Amino acid sequence: MLTRIAGLSARARGLLTVLAVLLLAAAGFGVHHALGPGSTATAPVAPGGPRTGDRIVPAPLAATAGPGPGYRLSERTAVRVDAAGEQAAEVRRIAGQLAEELRRPTGYPLDVTDGGPADGIRLALDPALPAETGTEGYRLTADAEGVRIAARTPAGLYRGTQTLRQLLPPQIESRVPVTDAPQWTVAAVAVDDRPRYAYRGAMLDVARHFFTPAEVKGYIDRLALYKINHLHLHLSDDQGWRIEIPGRPALTAVGASSEVGGTPGGFYTAADYREIVRYAQERYLTVVPEIDLPGHSNAILASYPELDCTGSARPWPYTGIEVGFSTVCPTGEAVFALTGEVIAEIARLTPGPYLHIGGDEVRAVAPEAYRDFVRRVGAQVVAAGKTPVGWNQTAPAAGPGGVGLLQYWDGKGRDQDVRDAVGRGAQVIMSPAGRSYLDMKYEASYPLGLRWAGTIDVRSAYSWDPDTLIDLPAGSVLGVEAPLWTETLDTPQQLDLMLLPRLPALAELGWSPKAGHDWARFRQRLAEEGARWTAAGFGYEKRSEVPWPAR
């Protein structure tokens, strides 16, 4: 069960959030935000009929319009499962999840059945699909008879169901029955699709401001729509520690008691964390937990003051947003005893292959001591059965038996270290702060976020290439990730405003083929997503560079 530190109740916090959103809306903020400095108004997209393959976000590998009227859902539509063997149960679960998502707005029964006639919606495991379809690729076809999604794996079928949702009218995202129901029609189309990169991630910082399991699930819902497959949870920082470690009770008794601004913090029990992992797994997202070490550790030092041998700790609670001042003792055996316990417990709770050890912005440790610390903690992660991930500052310590995956966010003359680490076998996730950090302001005057890495409008988030950002050997880049830091964000509504519409831009970088990368076309497709977000109850920032449909 969620453990919330004493103070404001969740209900009180929610009421304050609603009030804040209403005040912001009255001021012209949020989905009705005024044109910002330097913005240019654009022609709106005209509303259309059934959504065709050229409206999918992220853009598929190939989509071809077919003849005829397409398929119209009705009370007779069933979701049919065509799978056998040990994976059949998982395909049925995916079919049931799809049916539930479509039942809410349509009111149709949408029974889930095994096999049967060719009509309706069919999910089929098809090992005869080309090998290059991979584990997440799929083929979707729709005609007057029905919709068929085929894939080599259940993961591919799930990705295909997200595309099917985009091919239906935007009201399909409604959480309640639609009274003025449109025709629930899928245009005749053939889609062949697979991702460009294996790793497509988004990060949520729950350390600066704590978010409940239910709020994290809402975040996952938004990621899954755009085929994101990794959720990176930043679980510790100077302002708070957010996960229960049974052998180290002070981490939560003390370290979880606050957050930025001095409001009560919180933490996840093992059951809370498992529930987040389960929910993510059902949407084919892998959770990547991060414990930031040796810096960003003031919450650890407040909990266990004996681990501070440099005098770096600030008085507790630390409620500011300065970085780079704290560090655990880089050579103390007591520190490695704690890191070993923490890593073992988090690895036990985490089924995915990765465990992130941070490593950024460490200013009070000599380079050699820093490298030794990262190698030793990395070895603890390997011993726990996981691949260590680190921010790009850990590159000098990366290689066999240590950090195997680098998250590139801040070059600052360190690109050669990353290249050297790749030469020793490491791979790279691209998260350049000036392009992918979703907590950066859209423009200097925007009321939320920071701008130490510059400002990031939607076009800036879209207009770069992960393969060529820095000079690396072909195949070194495993994927992309969009971090969302929360120094200035403390409600789900604020997360929405920073996430949407920039998340789909970064999702397209990770999924869609490079050859089809085109801002002019993307902005047209993105504009149609606004109606889906409105139907789903998601907030979004109505940026002027996107030609949103006229209401």
Image (tube, rainbow, N blue to C red):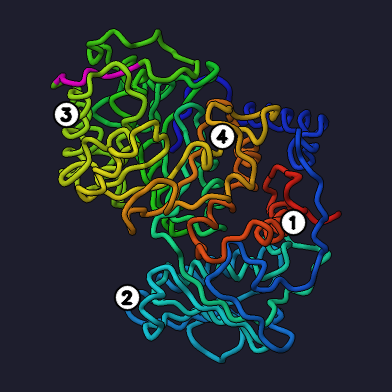
Q: Is residue 328 magenta?
A: yes
Disc 2 is placed on an element classified as helix
Going by the numbered disc 3, the residue's amino acid type is Asp
Q: Is residue 122 visible?
A: yes
Q: Earlier in the sequence, mark 2 or mark 1?
A: 2
Between 53 and 39, the residue placed more toward the observer is 39
Q: Position of residue 441 (x, y in %)?
A: 62, 33
Q: Position of residue 293 (x, y in %)?
A: 30, 28
Asked whether the beta carbons under mark 1 and mark 3 sit within 8 Å of each other, the answer is: no
Q: Which span is picked out in magenta?
A: 326-332
Q: Which mark is residue 439?
A: 4
- Between the C-alphas of marks 4 and 3, the distance is 32 Å
Q: Which mark is residue 531?
A: 1
If the image is split into quadrants, where does the N terminus sit? top left
Q: Earlier in the sequence, mark 4 or mark 3?
A: 3
Q: Residue at x 19, y 42 (%)?
A: 402
Q: Residues within 10 Å of mark 4 (few under 14, many from 20)?
A: many
Q: Earlier in the sequence, mark 4 or mark 2?
A: 2
Q: Main secondary structure of the magenta part?
A: loop
Toward which corner of the image does residue 551 lie, by quadrant? Answer: bottom right
